[in-house]
Amino acid sequence: MANKKPNIKSRPAPNVTIRKQPVVAKPAESQKKNLIFISIAVVVTAIVYAISLDNGWAKNWDDGGYVIEHDLVHKLSLHNLAQIFTVFYKGNYHPLTTILYALQYSLVGEKPFLYHFVNLVFHLADVVLVFIFVKRLIKNPEIAFITAIFFGIHPMHVESVAWVSELKDVMYTFFFLLSVLFYMKFSSSKEKSTKLYVVSLLFFLLSCLSKSAAVILPAVLILIDFYNGKKWKSKLANHSNYFIDFIGKTGSSIAGKIPFFIVGISFGIAAVMSQKSAGAIQDITRLYSWLERPLLASYAAMTYLAKMIVPIDLVNMYSYPDRQNGHLPLLYYVAPVVMLILAYLVYYSRKFSKDIVFGTFFFLITIALVLQLLPVGGAIVAERYSYIPYIGMFIIIGKGYVFSQESKLKFAAILKWAYPAILIIGLCAFSVLTFQRIRIWKDGEVLFTDLIKKTNLPFAYNNRGYYYFRFLKNNEKALSDFNKCLELDPTFHSALSNRGVLYYNFYGPNNSDSTHLRLALKDFSSALKSKSNDSEALIGRANTYSSMQKFKESIPDYDYYIKIKPDDADAYLWRGIALYNTGKYDQSFTDVEQSMKLKPENDATFMWRGILYYQKKDYQAALNDLNHSIKLNPKKLECYSWRGLTETGLKMYTEAIADYDYALSKNPKDPTVYINRSTAYFEMKNYKQAYADYCSAGHLNYALDKPHFMMLKGLAGDTSPVN
């Protein structure tokens, strides 16, 4: 029996679905789409921040120290450039940022527009780089756009952009992202171009020179390696044991970044040293135990996340918590639980998307150094610290948009329009809040008035008082604020020191008011009881003692101050004057010489060296210095009097009388000048004029020497009886 052939026609055909090939956008279309997204993000950000160009200075909140009162910024010179690169300033080391300040200052001085414009330009450039970074990493323009535009307009970023002092933030981010982009290009290239690696390393160096926070970049590069699934060279990589696999991959990634780690560790050490030099690294062990540090860090991380979603009640100072019945506030105990729950959700999300894991780790890595496990400064949270870290969170928000559009869940139809609507509403709300927040950063008075309304911190009153006193010259308002600060905290050493300066400068020696000098002395002494190395209180008390003619008491304070600030030229001069008045001329001369080395063209230094030469009877050297002092400052009358004395010593009586004449033309009520001119006339045997000047000094209540008076009276031919 023959075998039957199967009836092909009767068999059912397999049900095969032919997969459609994904529609790939043409390069030109993709570039056009990217350009549109970038343009929208930049334009929206520029519109929101345009008002910042009208802002002034927060002179009482770092702007004063970094620009207005920073001598190295005021003159571009080789000496100043060397100082910028080799000296820590106010607890920071960011020489590249300081050089840019100096360039701006050389162009416009203290006019704030250019400084704000440069900050905004860097911020807009950062928006572009954020888009490019996320697009290159995740290959999705929508996620890149959402990340970039939220980065651009988020209210928490106002501090970094609208505050001149945070040029370092927008600037280091610019170089940070360029370094990341060139590393990604290097990592993805088959030939592994050394040039790309070196360029990435160079931008990392520039980022570190802009702000030390950049040191975390090598860890970000390792994270990118993990995200991209780099081909690992280590034999331990891809091991069946997860822990060994992780160690192998991490070790392999680190090995490829040794130069980055060398740069990062070097600048990290420099950052710690600079912070220590200014006393910014605080020992809070007496306030918070090591077991409580994680609670503080968890609270800080939770606050950053909360304010990313609901950025309200923003302030420029988030102080450490006060204890309540010996315990931290409840939120500090809740925070670790919240963070653990979020950590579990992120861990769970790895099954669906590595983007959420990447965004979370990007946030944690870049925020880790400022979570105050090593306390730096007086704030537990600072809005500027969110500038780079929020990129990770915005990536997650962008990923949420993609999910909403591709979701197959039951409520997908609602999610498809609801999520974009929420994003649009959020962008509008954030734009308004950012616009309002920029206004708060208008100047130091508005900024700290806002802080006072929201917190009532003693610190806020002190800083606003300083603004009134130092920059607005409104002594009454300043005194009121200092008093309020000390009412809230009687041991607030900065306020005591500032009020002491106020008493000294505006109610003290200028008005010959010994009462206010005593009040100044009391405040400086109280400040030093609270903080024995308060440099402002030390120099303030030293100068107060000197103004009260208590030169011997002033010298120990000058000594301690100079030990803390050995590069303060004025302090050496003032100590030199105190030593002069105690008869220690050689020590005084040494101090004046040191002051001259630190500040070469200071008219007061040349005058005092001239005075010291005069005391040594080296009249020619004295005359040379006094001539130079007058050349530097022709309005200093005291110098003309001393030059007159020196010219008298050189028997240049005509020149001496000319100097005395000029001094008296400006201040006819200075009896010592009449006495000195009388001496010059006497040497010229012009006894009548010598006698007239001596009498003029007496009429101004100068204690005359009676025998000398009677001699001049006789030589002048005055026979009238003496009253």
Image: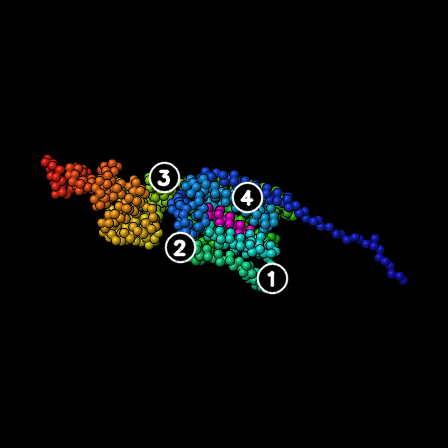
Magenta highlight on residue 175 = yes
Q: Name the residue type under label 4.
A: Ile
Sequence order check, earlier mark of 2 and 4: 4
Magenta highlight on residue 604 = no
Label ID, residue 238: 1
Q: CA distance from mark 3 to mark 4?
A: 38 Å
Residue linked to disc 3: 472
Residue 597 falls left or right of residue 252: left
Q: Name the residue type under label 3.
A: Leu
Residue linked to disc 2: 276
Residue 651 versus residue 584: which sits nearer the camera?
651
Q: Are marks 2 and 4 in contact (CB under 8 Å)?
A: no
Residue linked to disc 4: 149
Sequence order check, earlier mark of 3 and 4: 4
Q: Are marks 4 and 1 in contact (CB under 8 Å)?
A: no
Q: Tell me where the magenta segment starts and ends, as one range.
A: 164-181
Q: Secondary structure at mark 2?
A: helix
Q: Name the residue type under label 1.
A: Asn
